[in-house]
Image (spheres, rainbow, N blue to C red):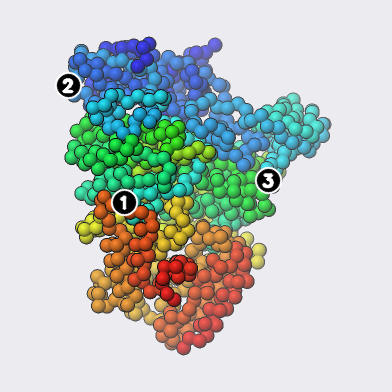
């Protein structure tokens, strides 16, 4: 029998001496309260353990119990519609004050309706579906053979109500339960990665039109405080067309998390009714909850996402924010005496971020279905400095970058996604998808919008020097068109009941309308009409229509376009 | 003190605020300790334990301590204090020892000062306002019950005056209310000013003052906000009061954290603040909030001075990421002789839309929009001279003038009711022609006599 004892405690860092066996990343239970911790270094019969809870009162010579397994996530019915902490312990219906506690063993005593989908004697492989459990909403839990399992179905229970830990089948000699466990730091296996080819429709025009992301892509969202990061991510989690959303708040504000949860539970899912919460798993490790559980929270979130991906769903993971996660890495590295690299972060920061973002992807699952995990990670650069390590390292690994601009936010232009500081590496693929879905001009229009905005920025800087009257009429037409692009297309208030979400057709119509008006303005300028003549025209109908038309009302947009074009007929 | 706790006298090392004692057994991390030295008692917290060594941070500092004449007595558990209504009306030092000639503060309950995180799913999102009687805050950056809203200031600006004014006159619309004022590294003059300004509130039994002065040991400063919040949580969630916690100056607090970190030889982060400053500040600020189904709330109003006015300095920067908005004071407005010198355009209360009435929100939005236009007009006037301004621009400049002298400006002892704030806001807006007031609904314009 091995014995392990605490020899040193320094905040969440606990040193342990042991005579038996301990493995890297093994979960151990520390002290009289069995606080969970993870082995992060082993040397000469001593191990360094990161504790996931407040270690106040823990003392040398306290007992440590190895558990023989790494930290695992409990994956099964009951995930959707609930809120968990970073170790996937349920918070919903939990106590008001979160005292340090051992990892729970049972999710709850609830029973779930299981409907078998296979017969005894059938051959199945890892990832095959054995049956289903209805979720609280449209998403159904598919109970799968574990990835390393497979063989003949030796027994399967009849349809009925079972507890999460009940055995529902024996496959190839191994029991299968409703709930499975998976080590959070290990990506779940797939048959193969396939090229991502379908855009994630977010309902936010600046993203869908200028900086789109594919289902299976990854995006980093850097923005200083007050630039509207959380608001943007909340909008996306409410409205995007992923099947399942995993919202991980790592180290963010408690009141904000409460707000997210309250809204999710109150809002109706725009896709097919039910509550929004019914397709959401929320992981909440707010800034004053234990630091190391925050570090684990992002891994737990992606593991949950992969679990749903393996059922054949498109899953979106939102991590707010990866900077707090990186800070937890830094804090622990500094306590354990790891040599600091840039700004005190450990040199492994890059690999840690890569490992996280690389868990995104579109795949063919072991069971043969198509599923995807899309990752959107917020970054909170200190001092709004975009050259800091977490931002710069993240930029290298993501397919898209949505940089939030303080100037735009101060001007109350939301979402404050910078058109000069953002990118979408999959825009070509999205363009191809748009062509096959009835929008052949999407890529060309996007290019025109971006070049208009860039040109207008250059002209605006010039106008600040020489005055607007120093510019020629065609240049002023460009400035006016770019203003229309900003105000009529890119601006979108998350609080607007009609425009908080924008359907695909309405977005495309707005672009078409603004570009048509822009063409007319340029034509007028080239015809020698003075700039004042078209600058004084009333373009209000087009600017206001985003708020007055419903989220899918493309016809109203085209009417507004015609109103404005008619108004411009009268310009002389 | 735990009677079973044992004393150890093998003090191996004294350096900076730290004491290392060897030969200890059964001492836990973050435990509280009493240190007897030269016939006097000091206090400490265990920063690290390793085998038979314990590193203790000495709250009162290590000045004059002789290792040979020092014994350390460990309490056997992290620091807990008595909590309850007994704190109301009392003035104590930064460790909670009375400095008002009264007896030690006792209470019916004991709570760990480290606090416990609140389950985010049991939080009630903040909704109703705390009325401060200060127009700039009530009108434009409403403080909401359960919110954390910092004041960002600079040396020389009247932030302490504003903080004490808010502490003296805030109310929760007739519901039970209390203020816990935590002074961190205040000068003696400032500490006296705070006591004087808050005397009436203390006498009414609605106030607790914890004063850690600038010449008190910096290490004690790390404890002061934790005491303040522990007292506040009990008053709020057990006694059912709405509690406002004012903490000033958080920059002094962060410097104290840095000092301990440096003494421990930790790897320095930005500007030598430790890498865990975010987690540390969050462990304080996040203790604000409301609990679903229970009366009472903890609202936190931290005040901090931005070194050299730099908002990207680690302390305001990290604070901004944790708190829900900020009230920024401006040297220019102060130089114009306006009190309180709140720069409304850079201030923000993220929760205001939950804490203010719809008509109030419209007026605030209109004032902010007009202020932004007025600032543009002022910049233009700098370029082309006031004569080159359009009629519209001149209107906006008149509006700004009315705003500064009528709405923003008030006396440090004036408690202005919200209705009066709203009246002054309308009065300032009324210098603008009706066509400019696009954010206000028709019926409101009509109700305030602004004719079509």
Residue B249 visible in the displayed image: no
Identified at 30% across, 66% down, the residue is B402
Of the pair A469 and A188, the residue shown nearer to us: A469
Q: Secondary structure at mark 1?
A: loop
State which quarter of the image contains the N terminus of chain B: top left
Query: CA gap, disc 2 to disc 3?
Result: 68 Å
Both marks 1 and 3 on one chain: no
Q: Badge 1 is on which residue?
A: B415
Determine contact: label 2, label 3, CB under 8 Å.
no
Which chain does the numbered disc 1 sit on?
Answer: B
Distance CA(mark 1)–CA(mark 2): 48 Å
Residue that carries the numbered disc 2 in the rendered image? B64
- Please tell me which residue is depicted at 51% across the width and 51% down the height of the picture: A233
Q: Secondary structure at mark 3?
A: loop
Q: Is residue B20 above or below residue A491?
A: above
User: Mark 1, mark 2: which one is toward the viewer?
Assistant: 1
Indicate which disc residue A137 carries: 3
Q: Give the residue displayed 47% in from the left and 84% down from the top.
A: A524
Q: Closest to the observer: B145 or B102?
A: B102
Q: Are marks 2 and 3 on the same chain?
A: no
Q: Is residue A193 above or below residue A152?
A: below
Q: Position of residue A75 (x, y in %)?
A: 63, 34
Q: Nearer the viewer, mark 1 or mark 3?
A: 1
On screen, residue A70 above or below B170: above
Q: Nearer the viewer, residue B197 or A250?
A: B197
Q: How many other residues sit within 10 Å of disc 1, few (<14), some (14-19) or many (≥20)?
A: some
Residue B448 horizontal/vertical position (percent): 41, 68
* Circle 3 crowding by C-alpha within 10 Å: few under 14, some 14–19, many from 20: some
């Amino acid at each position: 029998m091995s014995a392990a004892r605490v020899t040193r405690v320094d905040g969440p860092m606990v040193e342990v001496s042991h005579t038996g066996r301990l493995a890297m990343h093994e979960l151990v239970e520390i002290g009289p309260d069995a606080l969970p911790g993870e082995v992060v270094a082993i040397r000469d019969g001593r191990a360094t353990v990161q504790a996931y809870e407040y270690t106040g009162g823990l003392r040398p010579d306290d007992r440590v119990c190895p558990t023989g397994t790494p930290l695992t996530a409990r994956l099964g019915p009951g995930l959707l519609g609930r809120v968990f902490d970073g170790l996937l312990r349920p918070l919903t219906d939990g106590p008001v004050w979160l005292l340090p506690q051992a990892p729970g063993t049972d999710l709850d005593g609830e029973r779930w309706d299981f409907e078998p989908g296979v017969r005894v004697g059938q051959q199945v492989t890892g990832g095959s579906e054995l049956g289903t459990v209805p979720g609280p909403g449209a998403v159904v839990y598919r109970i799968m053979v574990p990835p390393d399992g497979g063989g003949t179905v030796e027994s399967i229970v009849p349809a009925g109500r079972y507890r999460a830990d009940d055995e529902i089948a024996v496959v190839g000699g191994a029991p299968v339960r409703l709930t499975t466990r998976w080590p959070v730091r290990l990506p779940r296996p797939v048959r193969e990665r396939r090229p991502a080819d379908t855009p994630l429709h977010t309902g936010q025009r600046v993203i869908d039109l200028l900086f789109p992301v594919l289902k299976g892509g990854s995006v980093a969202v850097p923005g200083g405080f007050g630039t509207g990061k959380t608001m943007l991510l909340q909008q996306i989690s409410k409205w995007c067309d992923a099947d399942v959303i995993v919202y991980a708040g790592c180290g963010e504000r408690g009141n904000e998390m409460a707000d997210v949860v309250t809204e999710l539970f109150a809002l109706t899912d725009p896709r097919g009714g039910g509550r929004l919460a019914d397709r959401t798993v929320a992981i909440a490790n707010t800034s004053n909850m234990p630091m190391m559980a925050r570090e684990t929270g992002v891994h737990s979130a992606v593991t949950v996402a992969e679990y749903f991906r393996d059922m054949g769903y498109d899953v979106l993971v939102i991590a707010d924010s990866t900077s707090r996660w990186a800070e937890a890495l830094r804090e622990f590295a500094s306590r354990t005496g790891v040599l600091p690299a840039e700004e005190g972060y450990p040199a492994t920061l890059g690999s840690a971020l890569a490992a996280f973002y690389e868990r995104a992807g579109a795949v063919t699952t072991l069971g043969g279905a198509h599923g995807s995990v899309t990752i959107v990670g917020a970054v909170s650069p200190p001092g709004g400095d975009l050259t800091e390590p977490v931002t710069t390292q993240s930029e290298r690994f993501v397919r898209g970058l949505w940089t939030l601009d303080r100037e735009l936010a101060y001007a109350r232009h939301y979402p404050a996604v910078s058109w000069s500081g953002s990118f979408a590496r999959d825009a070509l693929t999205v363009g191809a998808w748009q062509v096959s879905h009835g929008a052949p001009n999407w890529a060309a229009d996007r290019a025109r919008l971006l070049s208009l905005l860039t040109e207008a920025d250059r002209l605006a800087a010039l106008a600040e020097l020489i005055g607007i009257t120093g510019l020629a009429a065609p240049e002023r037409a460009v400035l006016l068109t770019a203003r229309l692009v900003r105000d009529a297309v890119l601006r979108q208030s998350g609080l607007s009941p009609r425009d908080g979400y924008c359907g695909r057709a309405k977005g495309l119509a707005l672009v078409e309308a603004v570009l048509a008006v822009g063409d007319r303005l340029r034509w007028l300028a080239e015809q020698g009409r003075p700039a004042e003549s078209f600058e004084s025209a009333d373009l209000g109908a087009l600017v206001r229509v985003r708020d007055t038309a419903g989220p899918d009302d493309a016809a109203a947009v085209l009417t507004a376009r015609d109103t404005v074009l008619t108004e411009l007929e009268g310009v002389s | 003190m735990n009677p079973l706790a044992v004393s150890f006298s093998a003090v191996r090392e004294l350096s900076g605020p730290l004491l290392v004692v060897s030969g200890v057994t059964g001492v836990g991390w973050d435990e509280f300790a009493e240190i007897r030295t030269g016939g006097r008692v000091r206090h400490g917290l265990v920063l690290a334990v390793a085998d038979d060594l314990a590193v203790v941070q000495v709250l009162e500092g290590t000045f004059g301590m002789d290792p040979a004449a020092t014994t350390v007595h460990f309490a056997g558990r992290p620091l807990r204090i008595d909590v309850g209504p007994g704190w109301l009306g009392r003035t104590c030092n930064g460790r909670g020892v009375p400095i008002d000639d009264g007896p030690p503060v006792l209470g019916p309950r004991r709570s760990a000062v480290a606090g416990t995180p609140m389950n985010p799913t049991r939080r009630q999102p903040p909704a109703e306002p705390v009325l401060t009687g200060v127009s700039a805050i009530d009108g434009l950056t409403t403080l909401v019950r359960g919110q954390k809203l910092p004041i960002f200031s600079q040396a020389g600006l009247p932030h302490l005056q504003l903080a004490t004014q808010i502490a003296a006159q805030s109310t929760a619309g007739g519901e039970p209310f209390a203020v816990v004022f935590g002074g961190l590294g205040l000068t003696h003059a400032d500490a006296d000013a705070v006591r004087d300004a808050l005397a009436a509130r203390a006498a009414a039994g609605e106030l607790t003052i914890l004063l850690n002065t600038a010449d008190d040991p910096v290490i004690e400063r790390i404890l002061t906000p934790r005491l303040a919040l522990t007292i506040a949580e009990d008053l709020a969630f057990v006694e059912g009061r709405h509690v406002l916690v004012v903490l000033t100056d958080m920059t002094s607090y962060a410097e104290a954290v840095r000092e301990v970190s440096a003494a421990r030889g930790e790897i320095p982060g930005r500007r030598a603040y430790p890498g865990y400053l975010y987690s540390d500040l969050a462990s304080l600020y996040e203790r604000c909030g409301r609990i679903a189904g229970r009366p009472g709330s903890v609202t936190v109003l931290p005040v901090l001075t931005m070194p050299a006015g730099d908002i990207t300095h680690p302390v305001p920067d990290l604070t901004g990421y944790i708190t829900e908005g900020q009230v920024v004071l401006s040297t220019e407005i102060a130089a114009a002789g306006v009190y309180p010198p709140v720069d409304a355009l850079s201030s923000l209360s993220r929760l205001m839309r939950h804490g203010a009435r719809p008509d109030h929100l419209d007026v605030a939005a209109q004032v902010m929009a007009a202020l932004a236009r007025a600032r543009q007009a002022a910049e233009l006037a700098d370029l082309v001279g006031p004569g080159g301004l359009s009629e519209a621009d001149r209107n906006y400049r008149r509006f700004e003038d009315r705003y500064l002298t009528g709405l923003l400006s008030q006396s440090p002892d004036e408690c202005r009711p919200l209705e009066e704030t709203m009246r002054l806001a309308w009065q300032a807006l009324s210098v603008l022609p009706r066509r400019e007031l696009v954010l206000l609904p028709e019926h409101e314009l009509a109700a305030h006599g602004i004719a079509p």
